[in-house]
Image: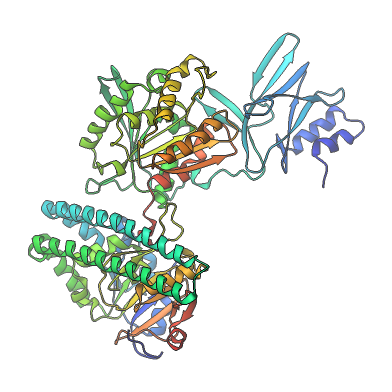
Amino acid sequence: MRRLAINRLRQRQPVDEATIDRFLERHEMPIIEGSKCTFCFRGAADEVWVCHRIVGQPQRVPMRRLGETSLWFTVLELPDGSRVEYQIEVRRGDHYEQGNDPLNPHVANSPVGSSSVCAGAGYQVPDWLTPDPDARPGEILDLPVPSKALRREAPCRVYLPARFSDLHSYPLLIVHDGDDYLNYAAMKTVLDNLIDRLDMAETIVVFTNPGDRNVEYANSSRHARFIAAELLPLLEERFPLLGKPSGRCLMGASFGGVASLSTAYRYPDLFGSLLLQSGSFVFTDIGQDHGGGEVFDPVVRFMNRYRSNPRKVAERAFISCGVYEPLIVQNRSMVPVFDGTGMQIRYVEARDGHSWEDWRDRLGEGLSWIYPGPQKYYYE
Amino acid sequence: MSEVDEGAVPRITLLGPQRRPSLDKVVQAMGLAGPFATITAGWQEREFDDAELHTHLRGDSHNLSLWHRLQDVLAQDADLAVAHRIRRDWIAQLQELYLIGVDHTMRAVRQIREQTENHPQVLAMAVADAEEVLRDLDRRHLARVHAVHAEFYERLVPHERPVVAHHRGEVAEVLSRCNAVVLAGGHVAELLDALHLFNIAPAGLDRLPIIAWSAGAMALTERVVLFNDNASREPTWSEVYDGGMGVLRDMVLLPSAHYRLRMQDHGRMSTFAHRFAPARCVLLDPGAKVQVGYDGRLPAYTPVIGSDGRTTTLGEARDA
């Protein structure tokens, strides 16, 4: 087996800055060689780390300096198909600085900033993420909804699929953190492509956005009332929707998953499907110490209550979680609980983390399972 | 079931999917002269993206515009539009509930087939009984769907509605000037809706030579069967959808069969063949060409699913 590129470099004598220049020009960073990923940093530093959030692994991995040069490196092992977000931390004297990898142009954006992306061997960006000029585009309308329950105006957006017609009846998907799904998970493009490819039914999708997310999405009765008793009736009056549980789905990631679950829990006969991505389903089996901070207190109370008396809150649920994220244990634990209530569960894992790109990559499988496209009717 | 040998005069030519078109060569080989009436309603709003089709027919074709005519009817006749929507909803509900029955029965068939400790003859009898349940479900479902359509047509009386009558008249007039009909694929449900509403069979489909592929071919049969073993959500069993035009009888047409069906699962395919017998399950894969005579018989070379679930020809299946 061929030696790693970094080891071949180390073997060369002498390794000077010009050699490093050529090395960095020749390789994309990080260097992916099978399951080995070589991370590099170049610059003056006293210490350098690769910082990631792979659960169960040291999350601050020190880099080694190559001789007396300005190059620092470390090699991590990533299984096939992995995608990891990371940053580089540098110490210069007493000063610590963390940021994206300056040698890697690939970044993932999120509401809390961006991170560098390491796509391991075998990882492929799904082809339905690329805007397809042949795919008929849907339309997005702004829909501000005055809410008594939330005591504010809730800014929503409505996706109408291409070929939208009042003569048809459409299933409805209500998305939590809607603008984040649009901005960080390319959801408009995903919907256009999946619908055009007949992988997903023509669907009206409503993107909702939180006010104080940590309050509204953490098992809030106000939020549930807004969705079920204010937003839904308004939508069913204004748009040609199927208007029955099998044509209604709640979706969300992280705390948005909790908001979806808790809304369905409070209104158990209303929503036929749930699409839950990396749900923050934190619970305790003994005591109340969950380690998530006080923002998780209402979530833990809700999850503990649910786990002690689980019940069917929807006919079907698609649940996904990244194996590198801390919530993997909780999500895995909830699958048999949901399953035991008689809900039809499709659970998928990915070698990915708690990130918008992970949730983006799972949309194809999730959406086409929740609302399958009309492929069975098409014979070209 | 009626069958003849090759060489009979083709009344209907069934082709495989036309992603790599062979239509022009087929038309030339048959010596068919235009003008051709084309039906591309399965393409829905892209119905008029038919320039290539027109070229393959030597520039001598007239699109019957059935999908756009249907939209015009629904836009102009509010009562009919509401009834149409309700009918679709009823049929969708019927389909959903029927599929629950199909799912359970198909699981039973599979479970019975997987038994290893029974005498083969006992096993075969049990499989046959379960398949009979399936056939009964299919029969009853089709009768229910027919009843929904009958009620719709009886109540709405489309031929007495001015906008429908107007379009029917135009369609019949175009068909009266054409020497053959060409039916393309697409969305089979949309295609069927349009074909039925504009009464295409008596207007010309019953007498003119026809070339059809994919959904267009399926629509010609008396029973349209939907199938997609690669569907993203279970169950992926095939299902009887609706009655077709009934121009072709005793056959279930399966476009892109090797792509859409698990043809290597012979047990599954055997049940498929038994389920729809005595109709023949005809494989219309890319490159296929099956010519049906005026007597409605399939030629011996027709690729079909045999009773054992393997691909064979009609001639071999008949001899087996």
In percent of width and height, residue A266 lies at: 31, 28
| Above or below, B221 relative to A15 | below
User: Which residue lies most toward the top here?
Assistant: A94
Residue at position x 30%, y 28% from top?
A227
Residue B189 visible in the current orientation: yes
Total numbered labels placed on residues in the image: 0
Q: Is residue A188 left or right of residue B176?
A: right
State which quadrant residue B126 falls in: bottom left
In this figure, which colouring scheme has been used for the structure?
A: rainbow
In percent of width and height, residue A277 lies at: 47, 34
Q: Nearer the viewer, residue A24 or A54?
A: A54
Q: Nearer the viewer, residue B163 or B308?
A: B308
Residue at position x 55%, y 18% from top?
A291
In percent of width and height, residue B266 lies at: 50, 71
User: Which residue lies most toward the right here?
Assistant: A13
Q: Is residue B189 left or right of residue A119?
A: left
In percent of width and height, residue A226 lies at: 29, 25
| Above or below, A147 relative to B242 | above
Quarter of the image with the N terminus of chain B is: bottom left
Q: Nearer the viewer, residue A196 or A207?
A: A207
Residue at position x 42%, y 49% from top?
A135
Residue A186 visible in the current orientation: no
Residue at position x 51%, y 25% from top?
A285
Q: Is residue B203 left or right of residue A15?
A: left
